[in-house]
Image (tube, rainbow, N blue to C red):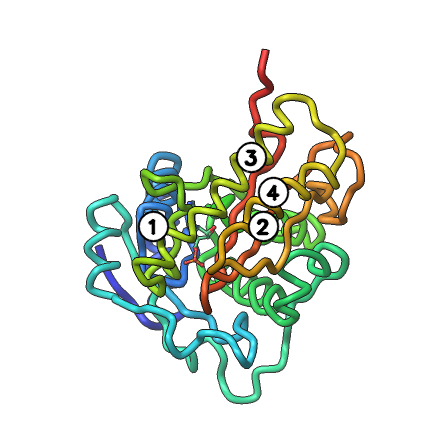
Amino acid sequence: MKIVKTVKEVREQVAEWRKQGLTVGLVPTMGYLHEGHASLIDRSVSENDRTVVSDFVNPMQFGPTEDLQTYPRDLAHDAALVEVHGGDLIFHPEPEEMYHEGFSSFVDMSVLTEELCGLSRPVHFRGVCTVVTKLFNIVQPDAAYFGKKDAQQLTIVRHMVDDLNMNLRIVGCPIVREDDGLAKSSRNTYLSAEERQAALVLSKAIALGSSLIKTGEVNAAVITGQMTELIKAEPLAKIDYVKLVDAATMQPIAVFDRPALCAVAVYIGKTRLIDNFFTEDVVPEV
Ligand code: AMP
């Protein structure tokens, strides 16, 4: 397993693999890797001859008041995890390697970015689309692996790849959770012991929404209303959103009559956490 910091080194390594006729998978991350990231690496390793993990805290996807400076970083830990899971290359660029002086090209998207996280994080998805496009151009992978934990991001990336005729497969992977249900996230490290306990309202609300859908509830206001009540009962929680949206357009729906995404974003103290489920992943009760 190698760690490289420049675009040139990635290109040289991938070119060598291509000469040998090998396939390449890409797992884009912001580092501080956990078992959620590991599941994407495992999937890529199982489907490709070589796997590249990008490990880059992308400044462009953080708003001015967000946690860019404090975002946790630990390259030695990340390298050990990638090695154990069979990844072949970590791309760990400095911000200047990705955004040279005078950088002025962006990839942006309408509609899908305007709801959910796009409302409270207005520059976020432009930063995501731009960096993901750059990573696709640098690595030129056969497939790239994204978690359903960031469901809106996954939907946006799929849409971007389709709109812009990018030549790769996008693979969505299930959410990996702690034993008590909390979705694994690098940001969970911000939580105090008390907040860690309070954070369980997210997965409990998701479980409630999912069970309402399983039992046939189709009224979005009823589903999100009950989830909202559950979250509001936790004093450390402050809701950003609780929504049921069309899975393709990310626009809110009143009636669950098509594939949908049920998503929540909740501040636990100062930490903003997200969780969700796609209704296509909910197994109806028989
Ligand atoms: P991040 O480093 O948070 O930007 O995440 C990098 C990738 O890992 C994204 O595609 C995330 O959706 C995915 N990921 C993060 N947490 C999880 C999780 N708990 N389960 C599955 N995938 C995850």
Outermost residue, top side: 286
Q: Is label 4 in contact with label 3 (beta carbons under 8 Å)?
A: yes
Task: Identify the residue position indicated by label 4 in the image.
Answer: 227
Q: Earlier in the sequence, mark 1 or mark 3?
A: 1
| Of callouts 4 and 3, the N-terminal one | 3
Indicate whether 163 appears above or below 213: below
**Dot 2 amino acid type:** Val
Q: Which residue is mark 2?
A: 264
Q: Which residue is mark 1?
A: 17
The alpha-carbon separation of the residues under discs 4 and 1 comes to 49 Å
Mark toward the start of the polypeptide (3 vs 2): 3
Q: Residue at x 23, y 58 (%)?
A: 79
Q: Nearer the viewer, mark 3 or mark 2?
A: 3
Q: Earlier in the sequence, mark 1 or mark 2?
A: 1
Which secondary structure lies at badge 1? helix
Residue 191 position (above or below residue 45):
below
* Secondary element at tag 4: helix
Residue 218's quadrant in the figure?
A: top right
Please give the label number shown on residue 208: 3
Residue 122, percent across and down?
Answer: 66, 70
Amino acid under label 3? Leu
Disc 1 from disc 2: Cα separation: 41 Å
Amino acid bearing label 1: Trp
